[in-house]
Amino acid sequence: MSRLRALLGLIKGDPRADRVVPPSGFTAQLTVLSAAAMAFLAVFALALSLASGRLAERWGTELAQTSTIRISAPPGQVERQTEAVLEVLRTTPGVALARPLDAAEQRALLEPWFGPDLPVESLPIPQLVEVIETASGYDSEGLRLRLRAEAPGAVLDDHTRWRRPLIAAAERLRALGVVSILLIAMAVAAMVTLAASAALAANAQVIGVLRLVGARDVYIARAFVRRFTLRALTGAAGGTALGMAAVALLPDASAAGGFLTGLGFAGWAWLVPLAIPVFAALVAFLATRNAALRALKGFT
């Protein structure tokens, strides 16, 4: 309850105490600009973290239940080994669907590297078989042994060596975004502390007079805390709005199909950056209160 009353008092303020803190000057500009800049960067760090999380989830989901069997055999044996592979897959528990890719699908897979006019029919390209797993999955090692016996030219690729590094990279990007947000919060705390300390030093004579008339340190510190908290809140709100507008102007992921173009918010995630100004105000509140009380103890 005491903390709630302190916050309510902070919002309401005291006009007489507010006169202790200069309403303008370089400390005000420093606090507002630094809060705006840090909030702008925090929006992009948050977008990076959320986009990386979506990417890891999508890669994990899409690649986890799909596999590919590559059949490399002499031309006269490809069809026979393909039928043998399909028969093995039909009797394998955990396989929901298995089908060989036709020439058009294989051409589409190779088109990004070799162009659209690749003569797939005349090239010794391995036959690919797409395998879709059930939710429970299949025994990959057991399937490899059966394929080795029934179709020596068939090689199973369950995408494990591709999926794990991709998911790990996405998770590291998400962790980098979280670390960036923490560093930004530390930078805001440092800037607000410096600005509050400068304001306290500039008003040393006023603080001395207030003490002579009986003002307590908590009363004096509350004025600094309120003023700098509101400055941080105002600057962070402006920086967050600019950051969200900049993120909204980024190219859509569906148009380019890349990760960096998908760096943004989706659905309810657009509400998450709205917490940045509140978080910045909380950081400023704690930093200013600590700086003010520490500095007032040093005044004689």
Image (cartoon, helix red, strand yellow):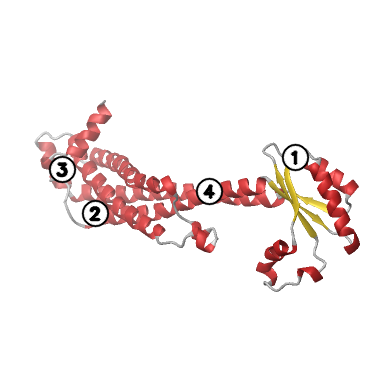
How far is the residue under mark 4 from the one under mark 1?
A: 26 Å
Residue 190 locus on image (x, y percent): 35, 49
Task: Pick out the residue farthest to the top.
Answer: 1
Q: Mark 4 points at which residue?
A: 54
The residue mark sitting in front, 3 or 1, is 1
Instruction: Give the mark nearer the N terminus: 3 vs 1.
Output: 1
How far is the residue under mark 3 from the one under mark 2?
A: 17 Å
How far is the residue under mark 2 from the one under mark 1?
A: 64 Å
- Tell me if 97 is positioned left or right of 62 in this view: right
The residue mark sitting in front, 4 or 2, is 4
Please report the residue visible at 71 percent of the width from the left and 66 percent of the height from the top. Answer: 107
Q: Name the residue under label 1.
A: 138
Residue count near mark 3 (Cα–Cα under 10 Å), binned few <14, some 14–19, many ≥20: many
Q: Mark 2 points at which residue?
A: 27
Task: Pick out the residue farthest to the bottom.
Answer: 117
Residue count near mark 2 (Cα–Cα under 10 Å), binned few <14, some 14–19, many ≥20: many
Quarter of the image where the C terminus is located: top left
Instruction: Give the mark nearer the N terminus: 2 vs 1.
Output: 2
- Tell me if 144 is positioned left or right of 279 in this view: right
Instruction: Out of 119 and 251, give the one closest to the viewer.
Output: 119
Query: Disc 4 residue type?
Result: Arg
Q: Name the residue under label 3.
A: 207
Query: Disc 1 residue type?
Result: Tyr
Q: Quadrant of residue 258?
A: bottom right
